Amino acid sequence: MTKPSSTEKWSISAWSVLAVFVIFNPLTFWITNKVFGLLGAPTIQGPRGGRPLAFAAPTFFGFTLHLIVFFLLVRAMMEIKLPGVKDQ
């Protein structure tokens, strides 16, 4: 098994950052809150007093849900062919 090149390491890092940005984005929490909130399991608390969404905080359930999705996404990224990364 060969070690990944520097370019491949940068590519993997960039894809990982993109995954974190998508999964832990406040808009993503808002979307999942719309779905899971109807089921009685909100993913964000607040905002209170008319403050914008940026002041809302994730619930323990919301953070755990997004962490599990991130875990599964990273595992899927190991199985699919990412641009800029050669197959071993």
Image (cartoon, helix red, strand yellow):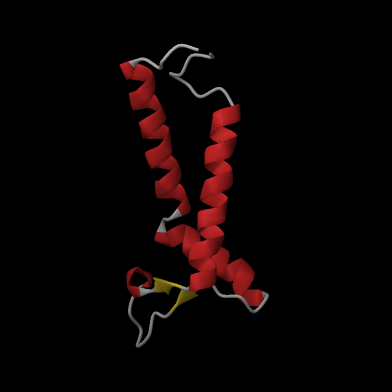
Relative height, residue 86 to residue 78 (above, below): above
Picture quarter containing residue 34? bottom right
Q: Is residue 17 left or right of residue 88?
A: left
Residue at position x 42%, y 80% in the image: 46
Relative height, residue 29 to residue 73 (above, below): below
Q: Position of residue 62 (x, y in %)?
A: 52, 67
Q: Position of residue 82 (x, y in %)?
A: 51, 24
Q: Nearer the viewer, residue 55 or 5?
A: 5
Residue at position x 33%, y 25% in the image: 10
Q: Position of residue 4 (x, y in %)?
A: 40, 17
Q: How many marks?
A: 0
Q: Is residue 77 left or right of residue 7?
A: right
Picture quarter containing residue 58? bottom left
Relative height, residue 17 to residue 86 (above, below): below
Q: Position of residue 23 (x, y in %)?
A: 47, 52
Q: Residue furthest front?
A: 1
Q: Nearer the viewer, residue 23 or 79?
A: 79
Residue at position x 48%, y 14% in the image: 86
Q: Residue furthest bottom?
A: 49
Q: Nearer the viewer, residue 72 or 54?
A: 72
Relative height, residue 50 to residue 27 (above, below): below
Q: Residue furthest right?
A: 39
